[in-house]
Amino acid sequence: WIGFHTKLSEGTVPYDDDQEGINEQVVIKFSHVVAENTPKGLAAQRFANRVDERSDGRIKVEVIPNGGLYSDQEEFEALQRGDIQMIAPATTKLSSFSSKWQVLDLPYAMPTRESIIEALNGEIGEILLQKLEKSNMKGLTLWINGFKQVTTNNGPIIQPADLNGQALRIMPSSVLKKQFELVGAKAIGLDFNDTYRLLESGELNGEENTISNIYSKKFFEVQSDLTISDHGFLGYAVIMNKDFWDHLTADQQKIISEALDETTRWNQTHSFAMNDEQLSIIQRNSSISIHRLTDKEKKEWAKAWEPVYLDFKEEIGEELLNKILELQE
Ligand code: LMR
């Protein structure tokens, strides 16, 4: 396989190790599509730093942010080819590998911050990560970004009916498409890094995303209205090429797992706060109108989208669906 040991042609010099003779540095290329100042961007860099410390520089994680090498779909192909070794795509983008992942996309699936953490750290997370093995992907952990909100150029969006006729960018996903169809919106699955351009040109009216993505990619500058609806979850599966993982030594795997455990804990305590802070910055520094849905209004959105649960019951399966419903009690 490609990519495990740094090739000399890439310029890394093997170094002497007293106990084991000549060793080469292991290089892990970690590609992602978001900005650096986001829950995922910061977690990826933090993980890289921890691995460097714990391995005394013998394992180097090179983080490539902003889709600098590969866009959403391309990064999966690059991972499977072994051109890169790690990615952390939105869980939504994993439904083409196993439809079970769609459970996390259901509207208001995990209505509180605590329920998100419980789902990801518990059986739901475990079952889902396991599903990646058959596609030669090793699911290592799950990271949080936060709740998705809605932005448009012609709001305000307060009632589900206000979404009627809106052309919206979504991540490619049958659940998300169905959800917006139910309220008369035209939802189109598009690459994350094409979104700004399409919003700016007015080809799309709006999109749904977390505050951190709305802020760091400047969507708020080209939209008139932002609705704090908290209607869906955005988080990430941290994935390695499985062949690559299996060829690491037990010691290398331990270093990586421990660095990831630490990073995941950090991510879970900081991601919501980062979204909160960036919302305050948007509020202070831009003219976008911000609408916070009341609990009663959120219930109306949830009700409008209830049929999605039934539509995807079979694809998701009762086991996972029941586990998610339990979290909502
Ligand atoms: C999106 O496509 O909107 C998100 O998946 C981007 C990300 O990785 O947060």
Image (cartoon, helix red, strand yellow):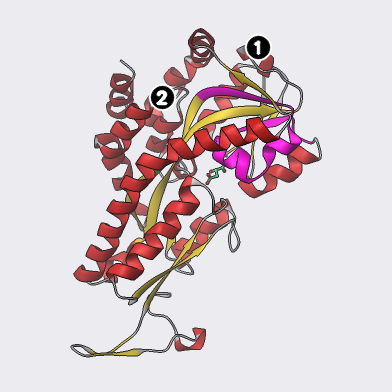
Mark 2 crowdedness (10 Å alpha carbons): few <14, some 14-19, many ≥20: many
Q: Which mark is residue 161?
A: 1
| Image: magenta residue range | 203-230
Q: Residue at x 68, y 39 (%)?
A: 219
Q: Secondary structure at mark 2?
A: loop
How far from the left and from the top, in percent, is residue 224? 74, 27
| Residue, far right | 201
Residue 222 magenta-highlighted:
yes
Distance between mark 2 and mark 1 Cα atoms: 21 Å
Q: Which mark is residue 109?
A: 2
Residue 132 magenta-highlighted:
no
Q: Quadrant of residue 68?
A: bottom right
| Residue sitting nearer the eye, 204 or 147 | 147
Can the viewer see residue 309 in this picture?
A: yes
Q: Residue at x 73, y 32 (%)?
A: 223
Is residue 248 left or right of 39 when viewed as pictured? left
**Where 22 sits versus 68, above or below?**
below
Q: Quadrant of residue 50?
A: bottom left
Q: Which mark is residue 313?
A: none
Amino acid on which disc 1 is placed: Ala
| Residue sitting nearer the eye, 74 or 58 | 58
| Location of the C terminus (image quadrant) | top left
Picture mark count? 2
Is residue 151 left or right of 139 when viewed as pictured? right
Amino acid on which disc 2 is placed: Ala
| Residue sitting nearer the eye, 87 or 308 | 87
Can the viewer see residue 169 in this picture?
A: no
